[in-house]
Amino acid sequence: MTRALVKLHRGKGKHLFFSKKNQVLLRLESYLERDYALRLEFDDDVISYCCQPETCHTDRGQRTPDFLVKRSNERFEYIEVHLASRVDDEYRARMKYFNDYIYAKSRRTFLLVTDEDMNKVASKNLDFLYEYKSLGFSYELSNLPEELSLAMLIHYFEESSMSRNNAHAAALSTIADAIYAFDMKEILSHSTLLKRN
């Protein structure tokens, strides 16, 4: 006779991710959660967030959300990140019930986000730019045009007597720090058109 295996509690993160926004190492359970954490890092409306924050109880069971997010308007929201291929009508109905119940009790929303809600190209861009976020470069951008290519921005920093590596990092940092923006649905390249925010 064999005994049944017990499913261990969530929170046993397999993917380590350092949050610059929270200044803490997070244990995430999937690459999908990491993709969502990157979005939170770049979202100026997000003050802070944590993963697997607490178990939410309802009269129909319990659920541990993937994230608890604090927004700039002091609003909190729970986020459940899931593969769209594993979300059916029954699962959506359960999530809606959780949202309605939790909101009635705590005024916190309980939202479902799927991989279909997160553009894959944007995820790659955010992943690439993350190492350049908050590097602490000081920028003199008053002479720069409202629009230019990434190659032109790198050249600008090279002209200001930066080494090629530092000029490249400084240019990417202006994008990561939201001084310049581009269409995140397109892969960032030297010819990408950047626009001042």
Image: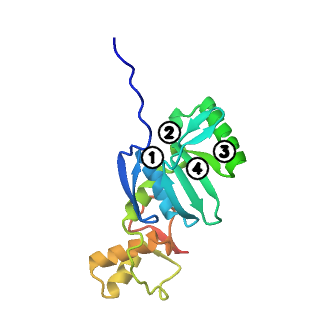
Percent position of residue 173, x then y: 41, 73
> Does residue 112 lie above or below 190 as drawn?
above
The C terminus sits in image quarter? bottom right
- Please give the label number shown on residue 102: 3
Q: Image point 69% across, 41% down: which residue? A: 101
Camera-side residue: 144 or 177? 177
Earlier sequence position, callout 4 versus callout 1: 1
The residue that mark 1 highlights is 32
* Residue 58: quadrant of the picture: top right
- Secondary structure beneath dot 3 equals helix
- Per the model, the C-alpha gap separating discs 3 and 4 is 9 Å
- Please give the label number shown on residue 83: 2
Q: Image point 43% across, 44% down: which residue? A: 11
Q: Image point 48% across, 62% down: which residue? A: 41
- Per the model, the C-alpha gap separating discs 2 and 3 is 22 Å
Earlier sequence position, callout 2 versus callout 3: 2
Camera-side residue: 47 or 188? 47
- Mark 2–mark 3 CB contact (< 8 Å): no
The residue that mark 4 highlights is 78
- Mark 1–mark 2 CB contact (< 8 Å): yes
What residue type is disc 2 on? Leu
- Secondary structure beneath dot 1 equals helix
Percent position of residue 78, x then y: 58, 50
Can the viewer see residue 185? no
Earlier sequence position, callout 1 versus callout 3: 1
- Secondary structure beneath dot 2 equals loop
* Residue 166: quadrant of the picture: bottom left
What residue type is disc 4 on? Tyr
- Mark 3–mark 4 CB contact (< 8 Å): yes
The N terminus sits in image quarter? top left
Earlier sequence position, callout 1 versus callout 2: 1
